Image: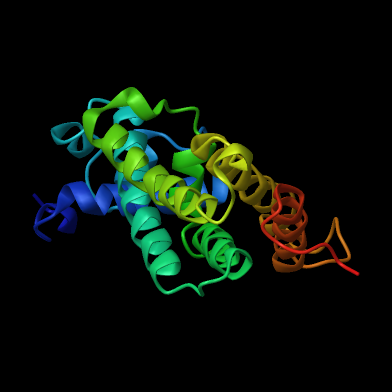
Amino acid sequence: MSKRGYHHGNLRQALIEAALKLIAENGPRGFTMAEAAKQANVSAAAPYRHFTGREELIVAMACEGFDLFADLLEYAYRDGQPSPLTAFEAVGHAYLAFARKHPGHYVAMFESGISPDASRDLAAACARANQVLVRAAHDLSQHLPADRRPPTEMFAAHVTAMSHGIVELYARGAPGKRSPFSPEELLETGIGIYLRGLGFLEPDR
């Protein structure tokens, strides 16, 4: 009982935070349960009081991440501007901000290979985050005639894919090394082109 980790009252959360630091630095396969225990300053056996192994610990990190992500997206969209471009820019910027502020969570959520169906809690948290994007797409789609509206889920998936791609290629690791433009500029222009193609915005003159 000499390890301080047994006395701080929340060993489970301490292990999650320790593992988040490790995967942010080394990737999802770059840590062991023993390393997470060492980072949390507890015995090598202590993590198994709460997790059966690495996968269950990663699921817990991803679940926490999707809850944070959903909160950020909801705030961004609720606080966004009334125009389609600025509303989706707000959501896109929230995506970039999340990846930068919570790199460990981002890795657990999107780079670990964990299925959203790995647990009920993870499935629910993932669905909640996605629903913000689907709701935003639905609300914006109402600006178009019914016969010109894209399927809501497809609309949301396109914006998600664009945001995720920019994060992966230009906002992680060494930002700016592979493009003369900032991730924000790439996202704003990409969303603008996409929305113009759908007819939400007037073409540039």
Q: How is the image coloured?
A: rainbow
Residue 192 as seen in the image, left or right of residue 113: right
Residue beneath the point at 54% across and 42% down:
146
Snapshot quadrant of residue 46: top left
Residue beneath the point at 68% across and 58% down:
171
Residue beneath the point at 56% across and 35% down:
154
Snapshot quadrant of residue 34: top left
- The relative height of residue 204 versus residue 126 in the rendered view (above or below) is below
Location of residue 51 in the rendering, given as x and y in whole percent from the top left corner: 22, 32
Residue 174 as seen in the image, left or right of residue 128: right
- The relative height of residue 81 versus residue 96 in the rendered view (above or below) is below
Q: Is residue 39 visible?
A: no
Location of residue 67 in the rendering, given as x and y in whole percent from the top left corner: 31, 51
3, 121: nearer the viewer:
121
Snapshot quadrant of residue 180: bottom right
Residue 1 as seen in the image, left or right of residue 147: left
Location of residue 195 in the rendering, given as x and y in whole percent from the top left corner: 69, 54
Location of residue 182 in the rendering, given as x and y in whole percent from the top left corner: 77, 67
15, 66: nearer the viewer:
66
166, 20: nearer the viewer:
166
Q: Is residue 126 visible?
A: yes
**Placement of the C terminus among the 4 image quadrants:** bottom right
Residue 106 as seen in the image, left or right of residue 196: left
